[in-house]
Image (spheres, helix red, strand yellow):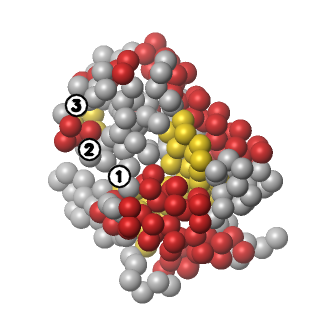
Amino acid sequence: MTHKPVHIEGAGRQGRFLVTCDHATNAVPPDLGGSLGLPAEDMARHIAWDPGALGVARALAAALDSPVVWAGFSRLVIDPNRGGRDPTQLMRLYDGSVIPGNRHAGPEERARRVAAYWQPYHDAIADLAARQTDPVIVALHSFTPQLRGRAPRPWQVGILHASDSRLSDPLIDLLQAEPDLVVGRNQPYPGHLPGDSIDRHALRHGRHNTLIELRNDLIATPETQQHWADRLAPLLRRALARIPD
């Protein structure tokens, strides 16, 4: 296999945070034909990746003097933010688009993709987290302003969390204090799926965590990605400082 399934930047940084980006790219490895049979316009959509999220994640990690790790493959290859028992780990239909390269992928092909792509990514996160003292996991995602046939989404940013909201609660409070923002709690998605990345690397270890969703039209350029990183970094530090010992 020549396709690199995981990328790490700033492994030697001394900050306490660990930034992850599950849906960083729409890249499809050569062994899957480079497109999964989808046209270019579909591969550019949110169904294949989280547009803008990687730029924010890298800039945010730098601002926090912390490492960042991201998946080097499209979520349509095998979704790194889904556990092994989740039927959406390998999607055949997403927001109105059929994925031809996944239509006939059975259990053996799914297992092959897990071993080749999904597992190395999660091994890298686990290794980085184990090197840090009491790491704080920050997952960076983006969402589309509107799904096909659905109402427009009003939020600029959503903060997702499961039962452990120790970091998310003060972060939401700080974001809601910003007069220009509409902030969603567990919007536009629920905050927890068994076996997802936060579950695997934070909840099971008792680590502070939050998942940040940014509307992708707001982070479409390097300048806006840097803007949001610069905006979020001090808020994350302040939110972490508000957690009781």
Question: 108 and 119: which one is in front?
Answer: 119
**Mark 1 Cα shell of 10 Å, populated few (<14), some (14-19), many (≥20):** many
Per the rendering, the mark at residue 13 is none
Report the residue at 72% width, 75% height from top: 241
The mark nearer the N terminus, 2 or 3, is 3
Q: Residue at x 30, y 21 (%)?
A: 33
Q: Is residue 142 visible?
A: yes
Q: Tell me: residue 116, above or below residue 240.
A: above
Q: Which of 30 and 139 is in front in this view?
A: 30
- As measured in the structure, the alpha-carbon distance from the residue carrying label 2 to the one carrying label 3 is 10 Å
* SS category of the residue bearing label 3: loop
Residue at screen point 64% across, 50% down: 10
Quadrant of residue 163 in the image?
A: bottom right
Q: Where is mark 1, residue-wise?
A: 51
Residue that label 3 marks: 38
Instruction: Choose the circle earlier in sequence order: 3 or 1.
Output: 3
Q: Name the residue under label 2.
A: 44
Q: Which amino acid does label 3 sit on?
A: Leu
Say if residue 164 shows up in the picture.
Answer: no
Q: Which amino acid does label 2 sit on?
A: Ala
The residue located at (54%, 35%) in the rendering is 6
Disc 1 from disc 2: Cα separation: 8 Å
Secondary element under disc 2, as helix, strand or loop, is loop
Against 201, is 189 above or below?
below
